[in-house]
Amino acid sequence: MLPSILFVCTGNICRSPLAEISMRIEASKRGLTCDIDSAATGRWNLHERPDFRAQNIIQKYHPSQILAMEQLSSRQVTKEDFLRFTHMIALDQTHFDWLKKEKPQNANPHISLLMEYLPQTTDKNVPDPYFGSENDFEYSWSLIKEACSELAIALFDR
């Protein structure tokens, strides 16, 4: 059975959409079609498209995925997500803690931090680039892309 994966960040307009697209690319490389999505812990940006700087990253590195990126719409994690997804991947510790706290008793997804898949890193948080520059988005993307590659190996190549 293929895993189903939900990436979670604060507003679902920067980090988690980048992770969603990165993981879709990893699945596609393997000829796999599985349930990959992203969502927010907060409600600030509901129904918004990904930040234009996140879209620029995808346009720059994976132009064939820009339409998929542009079609994403931010949403908040729901109780149903805890039952739908086998893996819920937090982009930082606050998201991880929130997921653990909100998880219904009857749900059993594997909840982890994305950066756990990069054991050589000391910081287990993907920095939020929202208030930063294009360079901050580039840095967050580099971490997300590398961690998603390792996550794909762990989930798809075993």
Image: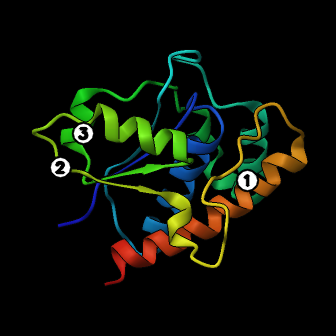
Q: Distance between the residues labelled 2 and 3?
A: 7 Å
Label 1: which residue?
A: 140
Nearer the observer: mark 1 or 2; the answer is: 2
Label 3: which residue?
A: 82
Observer-nearest of 40 and 58: 40
Mark 3 is surrounded, within 10 Å at the Cα level, by few (under 14), some (14 to 19) or many (20 or more) other residues, namely: many
Please tell me which residue is depicted at 52% across the width and 26% down the height of the picture: 73
Residue 25 horizontal side relative to residue 35, left or right: right
Please tell me which residue is depicted at 80% across the width and 56% down the height of the picture: 139
Q: Distance between the residues labelled 1 and 2?
A: 29 Å
Residue 60 horizontal side relative to residue 77, left or right: right
Residue 35: x percent and y percent? 32, 50
Name the element at disc 1. helix
Residue 125: x percent and y percent? 62, 53
Q: The C terminus lies in which quarter of the figure? A: bottom left
Mark 2 is surrounded, within 10 Å at the Cα level, by few (under 14), some (14 to 19) or many (20 or more) other residues, namely: some
Q: In which quarter of the view is residue 153 placed?
A: bottom left
Label 2: which residue?
A: 108
Residue 30: x percent and y percent? 41, 75
Q: Which amino acid does label 1 sit on?
A: Ser
Q: What residue type is labelled 3?
A: Phe
